Amino acid sequence: MAERFQAEGVPVSALVGRGDPAALIARNAETTHADLIVFGTHGKAGTKAFWANSVGAQVLAKTSRPALLVPVSHIA
């Protein structure tokens, strides 16, 4: 996905890590001074499902960076 965005001229970076996903995403967002954290969501149960112990909700509890939820159907 990063290559696709870069080809369109959108500045983007991607990281791969091992460990607790929420902690890694939040830490990397802070250390890289991310402008935006984008989460893909299936949205099957609306935003309630996102907040129900999801990685996204855990990330947002660990950082003050802004976030965007994008339906997975729009990512492919």
Image (cartoon, rainbow, N blue to C red):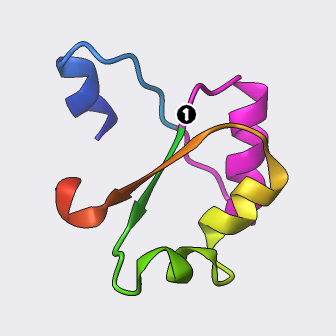
Front in this rendered view, residue 23 or 37 = 37
Relative placement, left or right, of 67 versus 71 is right
Residue drawn at x 67%, y 49% is 25
- Percent coordinates x, y for residue 52 in the rendering: 64, 84
The relative height of residue 48 versus residue 6 in the rendered view (above or below) is: below
Which of the image's four quarters has the N terminus?
top left
- Percent coordinates x, y for residue 63 in the rendering: 79, 45
- Check residue 57 for magenta coloring: no
Q: Is residue 56 visible?
A: yes
Specify the amino acid type for callout 1. Answer: Leu
The relative height of residue 46 versus residue 76 in the rendered view (above or below) is: below
Residue drawn at x 27%, y 20% is 6
Which of the image's four quarters has the C terminus?
bottom left
The relative height of residue 61 versus residue 14 in the rendered view (above or below) is: below
Residue bearing the label numbered 1: 36
- Percent coordinates x, y for residue 7 in the rendering: 18, 19
**Stretch in magenta:** 15-36
